[in-house]
Amino acid sequence: MNIYGAGSLEDIRKCTELGVKGILTNPQGFDQYYEGKMTLTEITQAILDASGDLPVFIQIHGEDADAIVERAHELRKLSDRVNMKIIGDEKGFTAIRRLQQEGINCIATCVFSVSQAAIAAMVGAYGICPFVSRAKEIGIDPFAVLSRIKRCYDEMDNPPIIFAVSLKGIGDIEDSFAAGANTIALRYPLLRQMMGHVLTSKAEALFAKNWARVKGEDVSYMADKIKMEGIAE
């Protein structure tokens, strides 16, 4: 189970420090975090600077396959760490095939069906991004789709990596992995949620009572947690 980071530059830095495998981007994030103040080239460079030596997948677009490939070539000049994320439609799959043949890894994004996943495999995509919460919104069971894709890919040599995205909570993450996703991509706040559990917090507060009885140990930093858990001194 691998995890990729996403989000603001600060999110990306925090995810990188924690050891994610790479960084994924999308235009919603470009709009939200950069507010029209930076070009895509400038955004890409900033993400490269914030992500250590990790691979980054920059979402690109264009009116046709030629335009998409041209934009990929422009961004690739910045670093060989720059890879592409491209909408999984006719022009996108055509561009993905061409770029993969050049050795530029591409993820087909906005995948909602086994059929799209099959085309992604056919054109040699590095990965696919099935959307979870957006599929739910229109009545698609994303986990059933993930499971069917995984079963199909298991019959192949070197299939695309399945990146579950559009995740709204821990339930989406755990159900995606259970359905067969190889990888998830998420912003730091959700990654932070993954690191905790109500019982873990309670156990730490309970252990604080024990630590307090060990000579020289200071557990004052856990006072609020002890109080919140209702544990008697």
Image: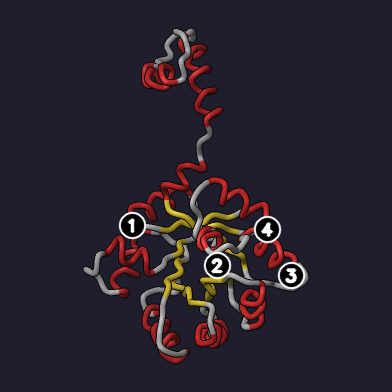
Residue 122 vs 220, above or below: the answer is below
Amino acid type at image mark 2: Cys
- Residue located beneath label 4 in the image: 180
**Coloured how?**
secondary structure
Q: Quadrant of the C terminus?
A: top left
Residue at 55% in and 57% down: 184
- Residue located beneath label 3 in the image: 152
Q: Secondary structure at mark 2?
A: strand
- Residue located beneath label 1 in the image: 9
- Residue located beneath label 2 in the image: 129
Which badge, 2 or 4, comes first in the chain's sequence? 2
Taking depth in this image into account, of 157 and 93 the one nearest to the observer is: 93
Horizontal arrangement in the rendering, residue 23 relative to residue 43 (left or right): right
Which badge, 2 or 1, comes first in the chain's sequence? 1
Mark 2–mark 4 distance (CA, rounded to whole Å): 13 Å
Amino acid type at image mark 3: Cys
Which of the two marks, 2 or 1, is nearer to us in this view?
2
Q: Position of residue 44 (x, y in %)?
A: 35, 70
Mark 2–mark 1 distance (CA, rounded to whole Å): 21 Å
> Does residue 22 show up?
yes
Q: Position of residue 220 (x, y in %)?
A: 37, 16
Q: Secondary structure at mark 3?
A: helix
Mark 4–mark 3 distance (CA, rounded to whole Å): 11 Å
